[in-house]
Amino acid sequence: MTQPDITGRTRVVGVIAHPVEHTLSPPMHNAEFRRLGLDWVYVPWDVAPEHLPAAVAGLRALGVAGFNVTIPHKQAVIPLLDQVEYEAEIIGAVNTVTCEGGVLTGFNTDMSGWQEDIQQDISLEGRSVCLVGVGGAARAISVGAYRAGAPRLVLAHRPEDLSQADTLAAHLREKCRGASVETVSLDSPACRDAVRSCEVVVNATPVGMASCPGLPLPAEWLHAAQYVYDVIYTPAETELMRAARALGCSVRGGLGMLARQGAMAFKLWTGTAPDPLAMEATLRRQLGI
Ligand code: NAP
């Protein structure tokens, strides 16, 4: 399908990231704009951290309809916005901004994209959820799990990430009232039992990507009654997913989360509900899977 002409009426959205070459969002959104006959275009912008305030001011002045925000700007963008929606504020990170009448509002659709994706398979109500990794994805997913009814969160981290884990745990204890939040180092003898005691295990680290091969935790810590979600979307099946499937676990990878967070941003900007499955199909084509 060809790109329609860009005219003076075309609405513009995009993504700010650094680097930005790897992003799959432009083809995902642009294919959906074309499919729905919307005169919109989605473009990538490489914004170095020191240029973030000027870039956000520029996007506001240019009158874009909104933009996505990804690594490394998801937290730094917050003070540059006029308002932040409740869930994004609890998470402390923004991945989607709307710009209506010059007012910039921040949202976090990573959280709701993950919730919607995993809840196709399993309800989180009353479940214990173990997150491996304590970075940006873990932050959004832990709040998402709590808000979807998970009363217990276990944060499994590398020993060198202890202070990052403690910071996230303190944040969750403050923002997610009533949740039980535990931290456990992946090298501690208690970690195996802590992981095994959770019904849902989420990999929120880059471990399993081609650039970071391996397993984020020993496969023998898992058991067949567990549900394993891997946020990684390339490769489509990670070592963790393969090992968990072989043990009899239910398994899902992160491609649906990527499509669904994008679909939610699309709806916020355009007011039109896209088809997340069509967006996921575009991602699959882009990735050749
Ligand atoms: P991040 O903020 O850098 O966090 C990654 C976390 O994993 C950090 O706590 C990091 O520790 C930790 N980590 C790295 N290697 C580890 C290891 N070997 N064992 C245990 N922990 C390790 O990155 P992020 O934004 O959370 O992204 C994490 C992954 O999720 C990436 O692969 C990203 O592509 C994916 N993701 C997917 C989606 C989706 O829609 N499916 C959305 C967001 C992110 P250090 O800080 O010490 O390095």
Image (cartoon, rainbow, N blue to C red):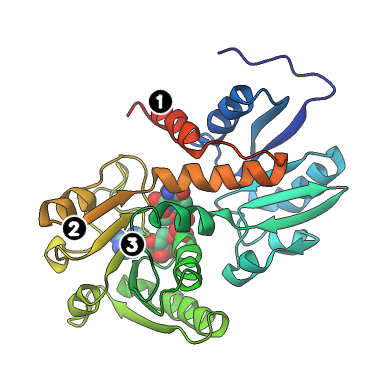
* Tag 3 residue: 202
Which quadrant of the figure contains the C terminus? top left
Q: Earlier in the sequence, mark 1 or mark 2?
A: 2
- The residues tagged by marks 2 and 3 sit, at their Cα atoms, a distance apart of 12 Å
Asked if residue 160 is positioned above or below residue 227 in the image, the reply reads below
Q: CA distance from mark 3 to mark 1?
A: 25 Å
Q: Position of residue 222 (x, y in %)?
A: 17, 65
Nearer to us of marks 2 and 3 is 2
Q: Residue at x 25, y 48 (%)?
A: 213
Question: Which residue in the structure is indicated by mark 1?
Answer: 285
Where is ligand 1, by quadrant? bottom left
Q: Quick check: can you spot residue 18?
A: no
- Report whether the residue tagged 1 is closer than 8 Å to ligand 1: no
- Residue marked by disc 2: 249
Q: CA distance from mark 1 to mark 2?
A: 27 Å
Out of 91 and 62, give the one closest to the viewer: 91
Circle 3 residues within 10 Å: few <14, some 14–19, many ≥20: many
In the image, is the residue at mark 2 within 8 Å of ligand 1 by its beta carbon?
no
Look at 35% across and 72% down and name the residue there: 160
* Residue 149 drawn above or below residue 245: below
Residue 207 is situated, as x and y percent measured from the top left of the image, at 30, 53
